[in-house]
Image (cartoon, rainbow, N blue to C red):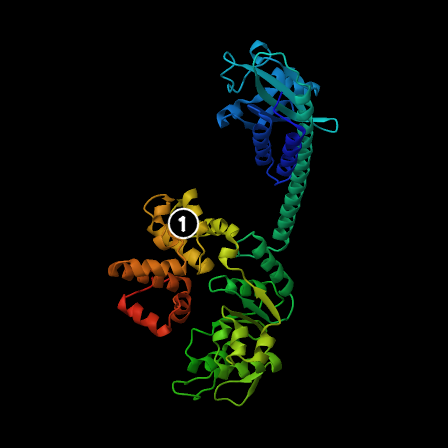
Amino acid sequence: MLKSSPTIELTALYEISKLLGASLNLKANIRGVMRVLAEYLDMKLGTVALRSGDEISILAAHGMSEDEIKKGRYRLGEGIIGRVAKIGSPIVIPNIGDEPLFLNKTGSRKIVQRENIAFLCVPIKFKNEILGVMSVDRLFGGKTVSFEEDLRLLKIIASLIGQAVKLHEEVARERETLIEAKESLARQLEGKYKVDNMIGRSSRITEVFGEIHRVAPSRANVLLRGESGTGKELVAKAIHFMSPRSKERFIKFNCASIPEGLLESELFGHEKGAFTNAIIARKGRFELADKGTIFLDEIGDLPLALQPKILRVLQEKEFERVGGEKTISVDVRLIAATSRNLEDLVAKGQFREDLYYRLNVVPVFLPALRERKDDIPLLIEHFLEKYNKENDKTISIKPSAMDTLSAYDWPGNVRELENTIERLVVMSSGDKIEPSDIPALIRDKSTGAKYGIQLQDALPSAVKDIEKLRILNALHATNGVHAKAARLLGITSRQIGYKIKKYNIELRAG
């Protein structure tokens, strides 16, 4: 008889009950149950096998190797385990060495000839449904023994396991239903909210697609928020071409790319003779965008002195050219974008609060690439196809290289990813991209702090190489805009200019 007493039995049953409800990992929970049986009830070897159709397979065991467990598969009615699963009643074999029906398919009982082993097998049921079989080996010294107490306890434990198995099945079914519903919704959203030239199926980017579809038909101003390289220009174009203004012009302008003294002329135009070299009158971007859409990128870099003129256009829909007195009326929809924290700029007095509220009618937040990593493989395949076609190549990517690229945080976001894939395609000497082809900076997945330590510990020549590589990556990620690259690196525009000159850094055109 298993070593037991009422106290030991109650303790074992309490521990087993806790284990079966410990998590949704049924296999791990039952492994714990088998350990308790071995510890408290002197079980030498035991298994829990579950039924699937006409086959019974061992799920968890004590005293067996993984290879032995894999061999534990039985047809319904085959051997002792298969028979118990078929008839639903316990079977006790007093000595398995004398029982021809005992198959020992796992090969785990190598001491049959040397020791007497009894085999107790009970069905695992829930109500009248047979879910599987629980078996226990125990040793005896050749004496005639009764197994009634053993069977009584094992039936109780098998009943607890049956409840856990059924609960696990119900949870699995509910989870599958939820997954199917989620996938169905995602397919519906993908069909309803699909944006040309934008790649992604993650929940974060799908939300953005939905916002684009909802705001596009309106006349409302839109403020696109997000880090550099997240695709704000693509979103602005999508809003324009899905709007009633789609047949009119889409004019884009980067507020950080033009010297402050030329900004007003670029935006509002100038009259002939307004300043030196103004030999003819010229329309500005707002005038060119009349009846259409103007996209002002990096609106946070707009000089404070120019902000009232932008506010006037939004409120009154009119302005004057530089050097002119004639008031020009325009019907323009404004889409602005920024990677800066406008709220902080307003608090510091660097951005007008009234302009902020006028711009922020419909804010759309674009997620960073690290926040939608499920989309990285899709983007990689898209860029591979694009640059293979441009370079007349058929480069593919190894799964290990895909994993490396997917694990990186991409501080330059989609723009940095695209530049990296283009570089890999152009520079590849084989037909597959290997992990070793990927730049070391990406392979190492360095954070700022870790990178700082590497710089401090490296030799001077290595420091120069790493610094040059970081500047190149930042410039690629920001389309060569020095001020934005400097912000990405945490240095000043003057410092990046000095280093570009020092290292003789040039970006390849295109």
Name the residue located 62 percent from the left edge and 59 percent from the top edge.
210
Judge the density around disc 1: few (<14), some (14-19), many (≥20) Cα neighbours within 10 Å: some
Quadrant showing the N terminus: top right
Q: Position of residue 209 (x, y in %)?
A: 59, 58
Number of marks: 1
Q: Can the viewer see residue 78 in this picture? A: no
In the depicted structure, whether residue 87 falls above or below residue 40: above
Quadrant showing the C terminus: bottom left
Most extreme residue toward the right is 127
Q: Nearer the viewer, residue 500 or 192?
A: 500
Most extreme residue toward the bottom is 325
Q: Can the viewer see residue 156 in this picture? A: yes
Q: Nearer the viewer, residue 21 or 286?
A: 21
Q: Position of residue 199 (x, y in %)?
A: 52, 54
Q: Position of residue 467 (x, y in %)?
A: 32, 62
Q: Nearer the viewer, residue 396 or 354?
A: 354
Q: Position of residue 265 (x, y in %)?
A: 46, 82
What amino acid does circle 1 point to? Asn
Query: Is 23 positioned to the left or the right of 466 in the image?
Result: right
Name the residue located 37 percent from the left edge and 72 percent from the top edge.
492
Q: Secondary structure at mark 1?
A: helix
Q: Nearer the viewer, residue 236 or 478?
A: 478
In the depicted structure, whether residue 430 falls above or below residue 138: below
Q: Which residue is mark 1?
A: 388
Quadrant of residue 29 within the rendered picture: top right
Quadrant of residue 357 within the rendered picture: bottom right
In the depicted structure, whether residue 361 falls above or below residue 136: below
